[in-house]
Amino acid sequence: MTIVQQMAARCAQGFAASSTIGDTRRHARVGRAFHPFVTRLSMKVSRRFPVFCGAVLALAASAPSMAADGAYVRLGVAAEWSRDAHFRDRDCAATAPPALFGCGAGRDGRTLGARGDFGDGHAFDVAVGRRFSPMLRGELLLTHRRGFDFDGQANFLNVAGPQPVGGSLRSTALFAAGYVDLAPIGRVQPFVGAGVGLARNRVGSMRYGFPGLGANASTTVSGGSHTGFAWMAAAGVNVALDAGWSVDVAWRYTDLGRVRSDHGDATIVRSSGSFDLDIAGTRARLRTHGLSLGLRRSF
C-alpha cells in the first residue's frame, strides 16, 4: 500500500467517525474553561481535516494512472515542417579553396547566400523511458527524419533572373529528455517536456540553377554531414487505453543544429561548357516543428 493510499484509508476512517470530530467542537466549550490553547487546536483540526482529506482522496483516486515508477517503450511517427534556413559560407573570406558566395551583400541587399527552407517531411521515433515519480519521467529518444528537401533562392551578384537552389536532407538525432506529467483528467494526462542531445545531419549535393545565364546553367556543390548539439521541446497529452497501453499526441519543436556542405569539387555548367572547381563548404541551421503520434507500452 502506497503512502497516498495509507493516508486515504485514514481519512476514510476519519470521515466515518465524523461524530467524533463533531464532538471536538462540543468539547471546545468545555475546553475554554480549562485551557484556551485546547479550544483553538480543536477548532482548527475540525475545520481543516475535511479539506485536507478531500485532497488526499482525490489524489488517491488518480493514483493508478500516476504510478510512481516503471519503465516504458514508445514508438512514434511525426509530420513536421521546417523553419527558414539560410545557407552561407563557413568562411566568406576563404581563398584556398575559395568561398562559394563571398562576403558582402547580394543583389537583393541581404548577405550573400541562399535562403529558403527544407519543406516538410516525416520523422520516426523510438524511445525507452522510466517514471521517477508521479509527475516526473525521463527517456532516451532516437529520431530519424526523411523527406526534407531544401528549396530556396540564391542572391549572387551579376546574375539576372531567379537563382533556384535545391538539395535533399536526412537527419538522425538522440536526445535525453525529461517530462512533467500534469494532473490527469479522466484517461487524458497533459504533459510538457524538453531534451538535449546530438544530431547528425546529412545534406546531399546542392544544385544552384541560373536560367538567366542559359537553359542548363548551374553550379552543383558537394554535400556533407555534421554532428552537433541539438535540443527539443514538446507539449501534448497521453491517452490511457488498457493493460498498460496508451497513446501520446504532442506538438514538438526541434533545433537540430547545423547542416554543412563539405569543401570539394563543384561542377560548373555554362553554355560554353563545364568544368570542376574546388569550393569551400557552406552551412545552415535545421529547425522543425510538427505533430507526433506515439504508442506507449508501460511495464
Image: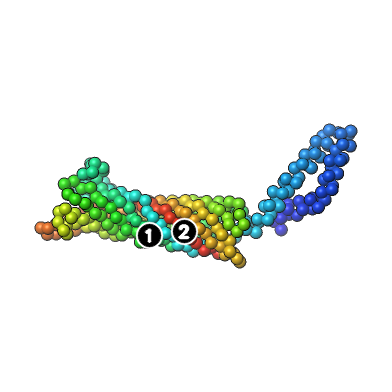
> What secondary structure is found at the residue carrying circle 2?
strand
Amino acid beneath label 1: Gly
* Residue 71 shows in this picture: no
> What secondary structure is found at the residue carrying circle 1?
strand
Label 2 – label 1 distance at C-alpha: 12 Å
Image marks 2 and 1: residues in contact by CB distance under 8 Å: no
Instruction: Give residue 136's position: percent from left, percent from top.
Output: 57, 52
In the foreground, 20 or 274: 20
Residue occupying image coordinates x 56% and y 62%: 246
- Compared across the picture, whether 94 is left or right of 29 comes to left
Residue occupying image coordinates x 61% and y 54%: 185
Q: Check residue 292 in the rendering and tell me which mark sits there, or answer none.
A: 2
Instruction: Give residue 192's position: percent from left, percent from top.
Output: 52, 51
Q: Check residue 256 in the rendering and tell me which mark sits there, or answer none.
A: none
Which label's residue is closer to the chain start, 2 or 1?
1
In the foreground, 146 or 116: 116
Question: The N terminus appears in which quarter of the rendering?
Answer: bottom right
Amino acid beneath label 2: Ser
Instruction: Give residue 167's position: percent from left, percent from top.
Output: 28, 58
In the foreground, 276 or 250: 250
- Compared across the picture, whether 259 is left or right of 192 comes to left
Residue occupying image coordinates x 56% and y 59%: 239
Q: Check residue 121 in the rendering and tell me which mark sits there, or answer none.
A: 1
* Residue 12 shows in this picture: yes
- When asked about the image quadrant of residue 38, the answer is top right
Residues packed near mark 1 inside 10 Å, few (<14), some (14 to 19) or many (20 plus): some
Instruction: Give residue 95's position: percent from left, percent from top.
Output: 20, 47
Query: As displayed, is residue 83 above or below residue 246?
Result: above
- When asked about the image quadrant of residue 184, the answer is bottom right
Residues packed near mark 2 inside 10 Å, few (<14), some (14 to 19) or many (20 plus): many
